Image (cartoon, helix red, strand yellow):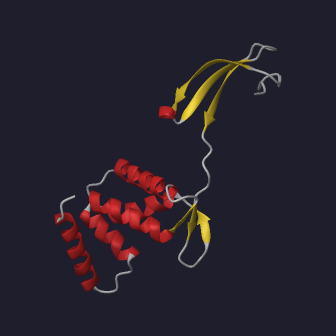
């Protein structure tokens, strides 16, 4: 690691500890040339996650897009911003378990599964857009499926 002050080639690690709840390692370093102390962080490099759209296009996964859809579905519902952020993070974690590419349909299914557990009204709102409801009967059918799934023991 180069010293940021004098650009010396070799620095010494004088202390290491976990940071960001174990997601990174914080290292205190000392430059033997100029005695400058500085801190570096070592993090795992994540591979980019690509979403394959229904029309065949590809784009990078964007958790903010998931959050926008969740906020719309949960508008006026007793769901906190923290719950939505946690849900969007769990959607991304689940998507990453499928590899570096995931379909938008897979993401939609995961969102629906998480919303079903969180709030039934938000689930129906999201399902109406995701499943492209065309008439009131579509809501009735989905509501019946939701009620059936909630009645089944886990």
Whether residue 75 appears in this view of the structure is no
Q: Position of residue 53 (x, y in %)?
A: 55, 73
Q: Count up the numbered dots.
A: 0
Residue nearest the viewer, comparing 151 with 128 = 151
Q: Position of residue 132 (x, y in %)?
A: 39, 80
Q: Position of residue 133 (x, y in %)?
A: 34, 82
Residue nearest the viewer, comparing 52 with 126 = 52
Left-right relation of 15 to 143:
right
Q: Residue at x 32, y 61 (%)?
A: 115
Residue nearest the viewer, comparing 98 with 135 = 98
Q: Position of residue 31 (x, y in %)?
A: 76, 17
Q: Residue at x 40, y 63 (%)?
A: 110
Question: Is 117 located above or below residue 28 in the figure?
Answer: below
Residue 10 occupies which quadrant of the picture? top right
Left-right relation of 28 to 102:
right
Left-right relation of 94 to 60:
left
Q: Residue at x 58, y 30 (%)?
A: 25
Question: Is 70 located above or below residue 11 in the figure?
Answer: below
Residue 4 occupies which quadrant of the picture? top right
Residue 145 occupies which quadrant of the picture? bottom left
Question: Is 61 located above or below residue 44 in the figure?
Answer: below
Question: Is 3 located above or below residue 151 in the figure?
Answer: above
Quadrant that contains the N terminus: top right
Whether residue 5 appears in this view of the structure is yes
Quadrant that contains the C terminus: bottom left
Left-right relation of 111 to 10:
left
């Amino acid at each position: 690691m180069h010293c940021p002050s004098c650009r010396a080639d070799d620095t010494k690690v004088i202390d290491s500890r976990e940071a960001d709840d174990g997601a990174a390692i914080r290292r205190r370093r000392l430059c033997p040339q100029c005695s400058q102390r500085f801190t570096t962080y070592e993090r795992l490099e994540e591979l980019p996650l690509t979403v394959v759209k229904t029309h065949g296009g590809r784009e990078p996964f964007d958790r903010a897009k998931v959050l926008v859809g969740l906020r719309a579905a949960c508008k006026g519902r007793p769901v906190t911003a923290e719950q939505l952020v946690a849900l969007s993070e769990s959607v991304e974690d689940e998507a990453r378990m499928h590899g570096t590419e995931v379909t938008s349909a897979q993401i939609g299914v995961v969102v629906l599964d998480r919303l079903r557990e969180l709030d039934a009204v938000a689930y129906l709102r999201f399902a109406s857009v995701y499943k492209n409801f065309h008439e009131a009967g579509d809501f009735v059918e989905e509501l019946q499926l939701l009620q059936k799934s909630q009645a089944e023991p886990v």
